[in-house]
Amino acid sequence: MQRHDPAPLRRTVRKSRMLRRSRAVWGKQRVWRPRLIFWAGALAIGLVSVGFAQLADAAHQAFEAIRSTPAFGTAAMLVLPPAGFALSAYLALRFFPNSQGSGIPQAIAARHLERDADRGELLSLRIAAGKILLTLLGLLSGASIGREGPTVQVGAAIMLSAGRLGGMVQARGLILAGSAAGIAAAFNTPLAGIVFAIEEMGRAYEARTNGLVLSAVVLAGLASLGLTGNYTYFGESDAVANTLQDWGLVVACGVAGGALGAVFTASALWLMRRIRRWSATAPIRRAVGAAALCGVIVAAVGFLSDGATYGTGYEQARGAVEGDPLPLMFFAEKFVASLASMASGIPGGIFAPSLAVGAGLGSTIGVLVGAGSGLAATLAMAGYFAGVVQAPMTAFVIILEMTGNQGNVIPLMLASLLGFGTARLVSGAPLYHSLARNFVADVLRLRRSQARGSDDMAP
């Protein structure tokens, strides 16, 4: 008598049960609703980033139009920055607290906070809206700031709000994903967004957030591509290191860029610490006064440089990368304007201005050694940016994607590493994480103050 083998029947029953379970899970609203809201949040980051970029360009063009007016252009150059800085600082302190500065420290700080209410003090849709408006006001006033850092805070706020709406509990992963999506959409650099999330935003990176970060970057990138198309931020560059002189240029640009970047970080932290202490007794009045004084410095440097240091510095950096030398002292002038803009505390980022300083430094080095500006500008951008943010992988990848120069991989990596190493020797304090600790302390101090107030009012 032939015996029947029950194994195939058991496998069939098991597959049938798994199929029914899969259909039940995927058909439930509680599974799909968070995903749909998360995807919508990522697409929203892409759309907001593109709109923010266009408005930022329009704001800078409006300032340039005012500055070039024969009747009162010179007066506008000297008056508009201090007035605009003072107004921006006042509005930030009065109506949009914690919107000051780049925005990246706020996103980093929010990942270190445990309570959702505390995160909301740094990342909310109201703060995101104020961040955009006040960054535009800064660009309209001639500030040496960028929109990329603010886009990180905006992206993190949008994603955190989407997570709350969808009932998602992975707050730290959502902040990471929103930050990465903001960088990817702002620069059209998806790889840099992912590397930035790993290296700078999440020093203690969790592997389980991979899916969130990748999904957010892809969807935000698709939204950006759909509106602006595929482009490289600084155009195309084919300059590569071939000769021994070129490799000497790699070392010079990496070391000089890292040293100057470390000086920027140390100076910015020292100035902001001094202003913070000085403003403690009268926060709004003194902070607004300090911002106005920084605006005077920006106006003076802009006047001396014939307007070259106003705004993001994108045009100058792109020109240097494409081989058009910049004035020998442009990097120093842009350095001072960017430092004053950051120390003022007005909302605005340092990504684009830092790249402009690096490009100017490289252009000067290239001209002095007779090597041209294209290769030197690209290398010094990597060295300086790695020195400022002390994130060499992000510096290397973001500049590689911005220039589309695949033949320059090893030189860019070396320049970034040299910039990072030199910066650590000069100043060991990373800029964004040092500022993030201030925001964490401020939020915890506010919570303790509110708790004491509640205790005092209790019967």
Image (spheres, grey):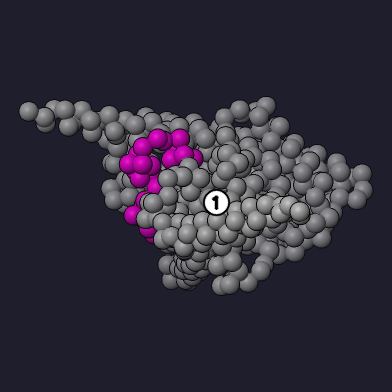
Task: State yes or no: residue 126 in magenta.
Answer: yes
| Residue 93 locus on image (x, y percent) | 32, 45
Q: Is residue 130 above or below residue 201?
A: below
Q: Residue 323, percent across and down?
A: 77, 60
**Which residue is painted at 92% across and 48% down in the image?**
243
Residue 186 seen from this side = no
Left/right placement of residue 160 relative to residue 330 reads left
Q: Position of residue 310 (x, y in %)?
A: 53, 57
Q: Which of 117 and 17 lies nearest the eye of the viewer?
A: 17
Q: Which residue is mark 1?
A: 212
The quadrant in which residue 121 appears is top left
The answer to which image quadrant residue 114 occupies is top left
Q: Nearer the viewer, residue 293 or 277?
A: 277
Residue at horizontal 80%, vertical 39%?
A: 251
Label 1 crowd bin: few (<14), some (14–19), many (20+), radius 10 Å: many
Please state the extent of the stretch shown in magenta in the rendering: 105-133
In the image: residue 135, left or right of residue 287 = right
Amino acid identity at mark 1: Leu
